[in-house]
Amino acid sequence: MLRDQVGGQGEIEIAQSERALHALEGRTDPFQVRRQNCPMPTTQAESAPQKALRKMGLTRDIDLALHIPLRYEDETRIVKLKDARDGDTVQIEAAVTDCEVQYRGRRQLVVTVDDGTDTCVLRFFTFYPSQQKSLAVGTKLRIRGELKGGFLGFQMVHPSWKPAGGELATALTPVYSTVAGLPQAYLRKAVASGLARAELGDTIPPDVPKRPHWTLKEALHFLHHPTPDVSMATLEDRSHPAWQRLKAEELLAQQLSQLQSKRARDKLKAPRLKAKKGGLHEQLLAALPFSLTAAQRRVSEEIARDVARDVPMHRLLQGDVGSGKTIVAALAAAVAIDAGWQCALMAPTEILAEQHFRKLIGWLEPLLAPRGQRVAWLTGSQRKKERGEMLALIASGEAALVVGTHAVIQEQVQFAKLGLAVIDEQHRFGVEQRLALRGKMLEPGHEPHMLMMSATPIPRTLAMSYYADLDVSTIDELPPGRTPVVTKLVADSRRDEIVERIRAQVAEGRQVYWVCPLIEESEALDLTNATATHEQLSEALPGVMVGLLHSRMPVPEKKAVMSLFVGGQMGVLVSTTVIEVGVDVPNASLMVIEHAERFGLSQLHQLRGRVGRGAAASACVLLYSTGDHGKLGDTAKARLKAMQETSDGFEIARRDLEIRGPGEFLGSRQSGAPLLRFADLMTDTHLLDWARQLAPVMLDRHPEYAERHIGRWLGGKSEYLKA
């Protein structure tokens, strides 16, 4: 059995892997003597590799079978050193001509081997005495590793090796993603065992059109052990028929589970929330100091139609930054309250929740007060007395609308009659949190209507897949009066010019944001932190109030800083990304984002949306650093270019999906939920279309196939898709 390459790992991790490997191969564990003196627990403890498998979610045979290799090693042939080149990963057979421990900066085992055509030096920075003995002069070895060619000849660092001779492999050797404590040798055996035991019968009905040619069993066996003649390009770009079968199955499982969840939800009951003529929502519309846009009216009508039915609404309201989603939510809340039910609005941060609270208090409190109702505020930072008062108001029903953070879903919060739940920036919440809010309606077989809001527009292909169980409403126009924001890319070397620009803006009575990615020094990232920037700007702008805001500040301090900035007394606010969403200061006309190359595209777009909210000309400066190499990476360059070229949130979202892929794009929507590990929504739309068409047919005509398919791919995780 080949020893696995361990170069680059920490010594403790290497030792753990070595011990696991020794145990797996039945060899003496060098730590065994020490352990014999320790009392053993009465029950058999889980081994480190078993814990690691569980940590990776590889608990079922099918999980192991679906753990596809990251890459492959070719152990099907022996290469002569004379035919090899620098950088090649090769397998050679050679005899040891020298073996010694050297001390060159650090202790290392240096072994010289000769295959008859050339020599190669093997270096081991971590090794056991038993290894040194096994590599004695004269020993013939089969060695595999990456060749590094230099002035003194070839060398390999921590290659894998075993005694020479024996049969060559007939298939490529898989290399799997793993974690500490789980060596490749153990994982290969575990996967092979799982693959042999897994039930891989066909779960796609035989009469399905465009049925994949390969069976799942054929596809998995091939992907774990491809034949040496396979085109590596088709494995790497996942266009091989084996990959196509796997991706088709994965997309089908997702579409089936989401459609199943939607149908199950459609059988539940929700309160009928019918808008009344001259009711609260019409009073609110009449009291507003602005008119709704056509898009706001359209989505409000879609929501009103949904909540008037006794089937739970499950709608995603998406709209670009500043498109006016909060007033749409307020109108939906007014309909619910008028029908005699409560509404809850949950936001991911206290700043965003407070922003909503201030707006909703202003709009709704004057209309609710004559009815003996009010808007309640609930966060984790509240004092015990205030919190108790709010809980009592919610339980009695006097609080018609409850606004807050995740505190809204805590166990002690009991609603009298929750009819509508609104979740803002829903992708920032985990699945369990969204399910907990829906569980606040206590009647069995009932759940509240659910409105989820997002300022990160979802591209159509992504919505079709990840949000197949949602109805989507889109606000596709901005309210009048929003000023276009000019976006400029500026190198960090021109920092002084930016400070002069800030001085001019503040002199005109405008306000400025300066956003930093870190709040304290990091050895890994040489970035100017928010605290240092705050000190520098305070010094450079005498007479200007410069504030500092970051996530580790106590809540009262955050509130005090935001109050000064919102009130206009503070000219410049230095902040981390806690101001990403929800901060609405129309007088702010300049946004400086430091180390913009470190931010994600949707995050940059959200931050840019904090300016341009008033009539003044506004700008967003993306201050970038090229680092030691003197140039930006391709990904960072693509992000900054996209920001400069467009301010359309949907185009930004499309490009973000291209750059980052769907998994990262969706954030914690997926927390605990099954990810698309194999399919790519940018290139596999034909498979997604196939899965979307097949899912309802399978549920209606072949329910037993559908259940087996969902069980195989999702196990117990399908519950999460109900969020």
Image (cartoon, rainbow, N blue to C red):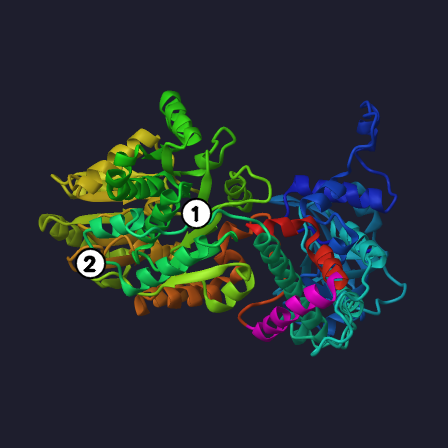
**The label number, if any, that marks residue 95 in the structure image:** none
Q: Position of residue 119 (x, y in %)?
A: 74, 64
Q: Residue at x 26, y 35 (%)?
A: 370
The residue wearing badge 2 is 618
Toward the top, the furthest residue is 385
The residue wearing badge 1 is 423
Q: Position of residue 705 (x, y in %)?
A: 76, 63
Q: Residue at x 77, y 36 (%)?
A: 46
Stretch of the chain drawn in magenta: 683-703
Toward the left, the furthest residue is 508
Indicate which disc, 1 or 2, sits on the residue closer to the N terminus. 1
The N terminus - image quarter: bottom right
Q: Position of residue 156 (x, y in %)?
A: 69, 59
Image-based side of 223 in relation to 36, left or right = left
Query: On screen, 18 above or below 32?
Result: below
Question: Residue 615 appears in which quarter of the rendering?
Answer: bottom left
Q: Position of residue 310 (x, y in %)?
A: 51, 52
Image-based side of 190 in relation to 543, left or right = right
Magenta segment, principal secondary structure?
Answer: helix
* Residue 407 is one of the magenta-drawn residues: no
Residues at marks 1 and 2, CA–CA distance in whole angstroms:
30 Å
Q: Amino acid at mark 1?
A: Ile
Image-based side of 555 in relation to 110, left or right = left
Question: Residue 358 appears in which quarter of the rendering?
Answer: top left
Dot 1 alpha-carbon crowd within 10 angstroms: few under 14, some 14 to 19, many 20 or more: many
Q: Of 490 and 74, which appears nearest the observer?
A: 490
* Residue 687 is one of the magenta-drawn residues: yes
Does residue 152 appear in this view? no
Q: Of 684 and 334, which appears nearest the observer?
A: 334
Query: On screen, 313 above or below 340?
Result: below
